[in-house]
Image (tube, grey):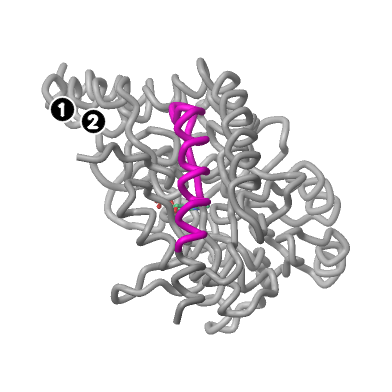
Amino acid sequence: MKKRLYLDWNATAPVLPTVQEAMIEALSKTPGNASSIHREGQAARAVVERARRSVAEAIGAPPQAVVITGGATESNNQVLRDHIRVTDDPFVTCTSVEHPSVLEVVAGFESRGVKTALWPVDAQGRLSLEWLEEKLKEGVTLVSVMWANNEVGNIFDVARIAELVHRSGALLHVDGTQALGRIPLNFQDSTVDFLTLSFHKMGGPKGIGATVIREGLKVGAILDGGHQERGRRPGTENVPAAAGLNAAARAVVEEGARWNESLVRGKEAFVETLLKAVDDVELRGDLERQLPNTVNAAFAEVDGEDLLLALDLEGISASSGSACTAGSLEPSHVILAMGFDEQQARQSVRFSFGPSTPEEELVRAAEQIGDIVRRLRELNASF
Ligand SMILES: Cc1ncc(COP(=O)(O)O)c(C=O)c1O
């Protein structure tokens, strides 16, 4: 069988060996409920609390700030929904390139009569701080922005945004899911009010994440029926996933800096080879401030879906970064928000990799992509 190369880490990453070991061990050796007072219960509690401390260390936050949840979709819903529940006259803004777990919640607010505004981006997917300043003057109460975008990899200037938001007395929610383990991310220094996280894009388990809450602020639960996580996330704790979360967070603490360097090198090699291998390729996003593991490329005259299928046959898994509905790919809302039309949006292909992706395989993949693009162009020209 052909050896495969997985270039879709922004969808989800292969689980780290240390995560897998920790989860298997917890599954077989930690049978208790973390809320029980007997020894098995206390052993399970210890696993959960260890995970909380490691997550806190990985992002530079105090452990008591970390609420363990079922992932970033849940955490994003929690922060946004709780804000409109507890705020008088809420006014929520989020960027037009957020993950659907923010965008769709905010769209739902609008249909319920809550004031909302979509923060537009330019053709490189960049945000205008002047736009934000205007909206803050109009009384925005919560700003929701991702630390880094999942489709084009843009990194937003969280520190500067936090400064403006706090000067106006509003609150800032940041979705750090794609930034974690790829670029340095520090909760305390950033002055973010609510940080939401998932660990499965860097080798942690799926279905577990965190809502990190600044001291003095509160976030209520979105579920009823339990006291777990001090009432902020009811439901029996997923102890094996917490064991995996701990291992993933330890890896960020111990390997994060090295991972970043290796991603930077890998991306340089990939992009350099790709640009030599094929003509008429447009790299999308803010090339000055972009994740070191993400490349979004559009190849003239080539449909992204055709390219993805051809790549898959050759053993390379990439993505268009868009939702798959009834077997066909929808154009990416991020690329559309950047002002491209549907056809241009359908040309975008996202390549995302991790620190364990060998550099020589990235180079080989870029050459192969070049060959396939040329073949598809010849095919298209012959019709
Ligand atoms: C930026 C961003 N936020 C949130 C999510 C959702 O995370 P989860 O899969 O943990 O619900 C994703 C994953 O697709 C993402 O890329």
Marks 2,1: beta carbons within 8 A:
yes
Magenta region, mostly helix, strand or loop?
Answer: helix
For the residue labelled by badge 2, is the local secondary structure a helix, a strand or a loop? Answer: helix
Relative placement, left or right, of 81 versus 208 is right
| Whole-percent x, y for residue 150 in the image | 54, 52
Residue appearing at x 61%, y 33% in the figure: 269
Point out the tag, 2 or 1, that comes first from the N-terminus: 1
Q: Which residue is mark 1?
A: 27
Say which amino acid is labelled 1: Leu
Q: Which mark is residue 152?
A: none
Query: Where, quadrant-wise, is the C terminus in this rendering?
Result: bottom left
The residue carrying pointer 2 sits among few (fewer than 14), some (14 to 19) or many (20 or more) residues within 10 Å by Cα, namely many
SS of the residue at dot 1? helix
Confirm whether the magenta stretch covers residue 368.
Answer: yes
How far across and down, in percent of the image, does residue 76 sit? 50, 55
The residue that appears at 82% across and 61% down in the rendered structure is 128
Identify which residue, 168 or 119, lies in the foreground: 119
Residue extent of the magenta highlight: 351-375
The question of residue 226 being in magenta is answered with: no
Q: Quadrant of the N terminus?
A: top left
Q: Is residue 117 visible?
A: no
Residue beneath label 2, please?
Answer: 240
Residue type of the residue flagged with mark 2: Pro
Q: Which image quadrant is residue 291 in? A: top right
Vertical placement of 66 versus 257: above or below? below
Residue 176's place in the image compared with 259, above or below, is: below
Image-quadrant location for residue 97: bottom right
Relative to 37, does residue 381 appear above or below in the rendering?
Answer: below
Q: Position of residue 369 (x, y in %)?
A: 48, 50
Please say whether residue 263 is visible from this viewpoint: yes
The CA distance from mark 2 to mark 1 is: 5 Å
